[in-house]
Image (spheres, coloured by chain):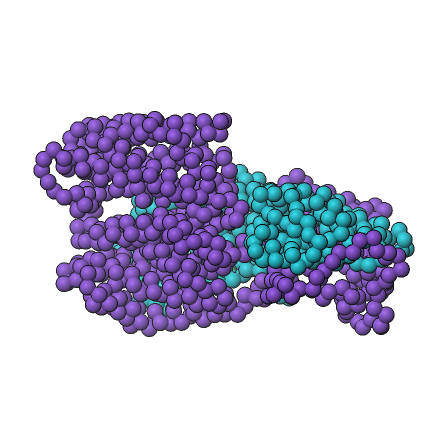
């Protein structure tokens, strides 16, 4: 056993040396770091740019069609240079000619009246108009609250509404980083192991060095194990870099050792998929295509799914990679998460073992 | 270049994968996956959809049992009456909700999510009350909004809406007196327009909506360029390139033949995608064609110079990422900042809306077009036996390239012409690198300027010295002062282009061309290139410690100058 492990270690060492000699591998790590740094920066910067309190006047030109009260309300709240019109027809003609980005129209604006106020907003489908609508939404939400409080005094109702603290407009929840980008980066890093396995295995076949290696006292199974380990061994290093980059950006991840262990387990699954892909396709390019199909299936679960579907999954949700990664990274270790992790571990080891047995018999047989 | 030979090569490029059953099955499976994805996409993107990772992401504690039950119905929240170790705590006292959360990123996020959920619960309460008591609609939901993106075809036909002032409203009611059927919304029981929503229901248009459609047409480009590069490296790895090159067909014909099917496939996919989105236009097709050719040109060079497929894949991944960022980052600010027009995607969007003239369109696309032409020509030149199957150094390849464009001649002018050419040879590549990194200004702001001036100095000094070092190595020039000539020629061509390009978009383009510093800039270019050339003349043009040290000195001086220019501009 000791000799066997030593042989595998020697082969892994040689493969790693080859891989590190490929200076371009550093570019992959650099690419990942660029993506993660930009994502964090964008997350921290964009809300201030796009959802700030003021929309620059130079950016949007707004036409207001309404009575004096409406015009006063809009000019004070929007804090923009607006153009007032008495008729919607004229405003629409000017809007069509491109003079304005939007028209805000209210036929009857009577906050103290007994009728809902209906406001029409004609807007283009461009970024400045989106910024304007986002600003108007906040203004109208505040106004709605004020009018409701005033009207409710004259119309007694038994309704229990909670008083809620104001939500700052320049902040957006970080859930996109934890639930979408983190699993995406995590799985992309891990998926490289499958791609790498196909490359280094087919390289041995194409260069015919596989015959020489197998003629030495190295079993087929050990040969496959060594190739897989070479592909998996770099994942924890890449992931550690990631965790550090995220922490530097204020996104602290919990359970880092378990996350690293999980990356190794998923790496085992992806190299196994590499073996099956080579068996099906027989050559490098087609094997990569087959692996891509496996990847699409895995990555589909990163897309938003209907919440009813997720709910119906019940306990099974704990073994979906995107869920397990996010839970481990930013929640405490609950019973369900630990069980999900253990099931993933057992399944990954089993798939790894079966695929390598299969590969040694049918791929190298 | 014969069309017949190109078509022959293209035909073989298409037939080769079709001969393999596994290739066909892989393509079929991929197609089925893509079709399934497009069918399932609407359900993925529905309003009740969330990423799996967000399911029960936030643990929330509350002292109100009723609220815990309600919060547990929200997919993103896992609520309990236990207040220990929670991402957020909601304490209810006299109808006031106090939300407490740790000062971490996740805590802040949990706070926002809980506040949003409580707001939604209030909305539910309001809705239930209105359904029970329709008269209360004007009290509980006093404002309704309609967002209209399309306007009437004939504006003059619009009813003249005149605004009423000083109208008495005291006794008006809007209630529909008929019996309210079950499951009716508040809009259906009142006279409120059917497409109106309350302010909280306003859906902010997707800020980068146009980018999503651009992504749909651009994404296939990267895939097909990867297939093209794989096809090139395959000839290298299998050494089939030797047989190909010994056949009566030129490298240009081989490359064009290999490029053609993938290029056409991109155009067909782009057409289909843009037709299905109802956005087809010639502008889109031209922009995508230019982008594709530029990426294919870069992929070609990387494939030829890579040692192995892994080497190629890793390098392509990095380069494509930079290209991707260059395309999409500035485009996010389309309509907000004029510099966003450096991205061909912004130009594409604006031209489809008819906001840009043909001349401007061509002009703005010129850097990418130039990159496409130069990289494809360079790639074709590199596709030969001694580059494909030997490990030649980059300077020796560059020297060969210089030999093609520099007519061998004796006499005094020959070294001068060589130095001028080496100064301007890499301008398209240098210029593109600078443009590609300029996108960092958007997310990182002025804080990145320090990094950008170093990148610019590094790209320009390295680009200028590549040709000079090759010429020194081949002993075509001996005097290091020719470095100064390369620097001067680089300065003249580059500044003319920058003046035309940036001055075109924005007044801030003059930042790059401060007249009073122009002569000083010329001096810096000559000085830096001379210093670098001096280093290389001492090592006979080889990249050794001495030459690299002198190059670093040149880069440092150049970077300090760049920094001074920007500092001078910022401080007035």
Quarter of the rendering containing residue A294: bottom left
- Of A256 and B424, nearer the camera is B424
Do we see residue A65 in this rendering? Answer: yes
Q: Residue at x 33, y 62 (%)?
A: B263
- Of B156 and A105, nearer the camera is B156
Q: Residue at x 35, y 34 (%)?
A: B457
Horizontal side of A288 relative to B422 (left or right) equals: right
Q: Residue at x 22, y 61 (%)?
A: B254
Quarter of the rendering containing residue B259: bottom left
- Of B232 and A118, nearer the camera is A118
Q: Chain A takes which shade in the image? A: cyan
Do we see residue A8 in this rendering? Answer: no
Instruction: Relative to A242, say whether B288 is above or below.
Output: below
What x and y, as percent, mark residue B133? 86, 64
What x and y, as percent, mark residue B506? 46, 41
Horizontal side of A348 relative to B376 (left or right) equals: right
What x and y, as percent, mark residue B32? 45, 71
- Number of numbered markers: 0
Q: Residue at x 72, y 60 (%)?
A: B161
The quarter of the rendered structure image containing the C terminus of chain A is bottom left
Chain letter for the purple part: B
- Of B160 and A363, nearer the camera is B160
What x and y, as percent, mark residue B252? 21, 58
Horizontal side of B427 relative to A64 (left or right) equals: left
Q: Residue furthest left?
A: B410
């Amino acid at each position: 056993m000791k000799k066997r492990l030593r042989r595998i270690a020697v082969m892994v060492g040689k493969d790693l040396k080859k891989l590190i000699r490929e200076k371009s591998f550093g570019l992959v790590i650099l690419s990942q770091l660029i993506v993660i740094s930009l994502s964090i920066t964008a997350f921290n910067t964009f809300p201030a740019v796009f959802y700030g309190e003021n929309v620059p006047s130079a950016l949007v030109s707004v036409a207001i069609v309404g009575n004096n009260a409406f015009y006063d309300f809009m000019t004070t709240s929007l804090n923009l240079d607006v153009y007032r019109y008495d008729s919607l027809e004229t405003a629409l003609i000017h809007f069509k000619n491109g003079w304005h980005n939007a028209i805000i129209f209210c036929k009857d604006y009577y906050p103290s009246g007994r009728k809902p106020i209906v406001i029409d907003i004609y807007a283009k489908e461009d970024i400045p108009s989106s910024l304007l609508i986002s600003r108007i939404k906040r203004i109208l939400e505040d106004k709605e609250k004020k009018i409701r409080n005033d009207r409710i005094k004259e119309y007694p109702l038994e309704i229990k509404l909670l008083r809620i603290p104001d939500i700052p407009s320049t902040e957006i929840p970080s859930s996109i980083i934890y639930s979408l980008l983190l699993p995406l980066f995590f799985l992309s890093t891990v998926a490289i192991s499958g791609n790498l396995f196909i490359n280094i295995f087919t390289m041995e076949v194409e260069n015919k060095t596989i015959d020489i290696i197998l003629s030495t006292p190295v079993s087929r199974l050990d040969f496959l194990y060594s190739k897989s380990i070479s592909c998996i061994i770099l994942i924890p290093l890449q992931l550690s870099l990631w965790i550090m980059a995220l922490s530097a950006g204020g996104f602290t991840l919990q359970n880092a050792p378990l996350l690293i262990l999980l990356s190794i387990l998923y790496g085992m699954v992806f190299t196994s998929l590499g073996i099956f892909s080579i068996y099906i396709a027989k050559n490098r390019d087609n094997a990569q295509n087959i692996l891509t199909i496996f990847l699409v299936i895995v990555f589909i679960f990163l897309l938003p799914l209907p919440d009813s579907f997720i709910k119906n999954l019940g306990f099974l949700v704990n073994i979906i990679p995107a869920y397990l990664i996010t839970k481990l990274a930013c929640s405490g270790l609950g019973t369900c998460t630990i069980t999900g992790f253990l099931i993933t571990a057992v399944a990954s080891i089993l798939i790894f073992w079966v695929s390598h047995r299969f590969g040694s018999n049918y791929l190298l047989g | 270049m014969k069309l017949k030979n190109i078509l022959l090569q293209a035909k073989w490029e298409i037939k080769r994968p079709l001969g393999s059953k596994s290739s066909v099955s892989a393509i079929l499976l991929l197609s089925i996956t893509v079709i399934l994805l497009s069918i399932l996409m609407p359900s993925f993107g529905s309003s009740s959809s969330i990423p799996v990772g967000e399911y029960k992401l936030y643990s929330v504690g509350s002292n109100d049992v009723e609220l815990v039950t309600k919060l547990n119905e929200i997919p993103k929240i896992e609520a309990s009456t236990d207040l220990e170790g929670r991402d957020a705590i909601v304490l209810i006292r006299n109808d006031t909700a106090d939300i407490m959360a740790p000062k971490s990123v996740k805590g802040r996020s949990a706070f926002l999510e809980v506040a949003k959920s409580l707001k939604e619960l209030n909305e539910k309460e309001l809705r239930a009350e209105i359904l029970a008591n329709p008269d209360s609609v004007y009290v509980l939901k006093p404002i309704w909004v309609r967002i209209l993106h399309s306007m009437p075809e004939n504006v003059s036909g619009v009813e003249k809406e005149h605004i009423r002032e000083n109208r008495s409203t005291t006794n008006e009611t809007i209630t529909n007196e008929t019996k309210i059927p079950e499951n009716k919304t508040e809009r259906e029981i009142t006279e409120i327009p059917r497409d109106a929503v309350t302010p909280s229901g306003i859906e902010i248009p997707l800020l980068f909506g146009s980018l999503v459609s651009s992504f749909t047409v651009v994404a296939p480009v990267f895939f097909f360029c990867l297939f093209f590069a794989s096809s090139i490296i395959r000839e290298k790895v299998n050494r089939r390139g030797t047989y190909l090159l010994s056949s009566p067909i030129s490298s240009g014909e081989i490359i064009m033949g290999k490029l053609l099917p993938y290029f056409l496939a991109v155009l067909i996919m782009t057409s289909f995608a843009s037709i299905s989105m109802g956005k087809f236009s010639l502008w889109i097709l031209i922009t995508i064609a230019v982008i594709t050719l530029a990426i294919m040109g870069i992929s070609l060079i990387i494939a030829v110079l890579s040692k192995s497929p892994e080497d190629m894949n890793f390098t392509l991944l990095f380069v494509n990422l930079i290209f991707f960022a260059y395309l999409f980052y500035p485009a996010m600010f389309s309509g907000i900042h004029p510099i966003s027009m450096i991205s061909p995607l912004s130009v594409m969007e604006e031209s489809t809306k008819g906001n840009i003239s043909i001349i401007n369109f061509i002009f703005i696309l010129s850097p990418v077009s130039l990159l496409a032409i130069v990289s494809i020509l360079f790639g074709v030149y590199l596709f030969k036996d001694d580059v494909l199957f030997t490990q030649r150094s980059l300077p020796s390849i560059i020297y060969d390239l210089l030999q093609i464009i520099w007519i061998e001649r004796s006499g005094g002018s020959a070294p001068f012409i060589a130095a001028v050419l080496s100064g301007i040879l890499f301008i398209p590549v240098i210029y593109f690198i600078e443009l590609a990194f300029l996108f960092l200004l958007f997310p990182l702001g002025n804080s990145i300027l320090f990094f950008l001036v170093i990148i610019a100095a590094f790209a320009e000094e390295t680009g200028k010295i590549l040709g000079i070092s090759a010429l020194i190595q081949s002993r075509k020039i001996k005097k290091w002062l020719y470095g100064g000539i390369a620097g001067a020629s680089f300065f003249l061509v580059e500044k003319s282009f920058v003046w035309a390009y940036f001055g075109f978009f924005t007044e801030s383009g003059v930042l790059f061309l401060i007249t009073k510093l122009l002569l000083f800039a010329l001096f810096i270019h000559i000085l830096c290139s001379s210093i670098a050339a001096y280093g290389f003349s001492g090592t006979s043009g080889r990249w050794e410690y001495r030459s690299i040290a002198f190059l670093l000195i040149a880069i440092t001086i150049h970077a300090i100058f760049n920094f001074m220019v920007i500092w001078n501009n910022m401080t007035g």
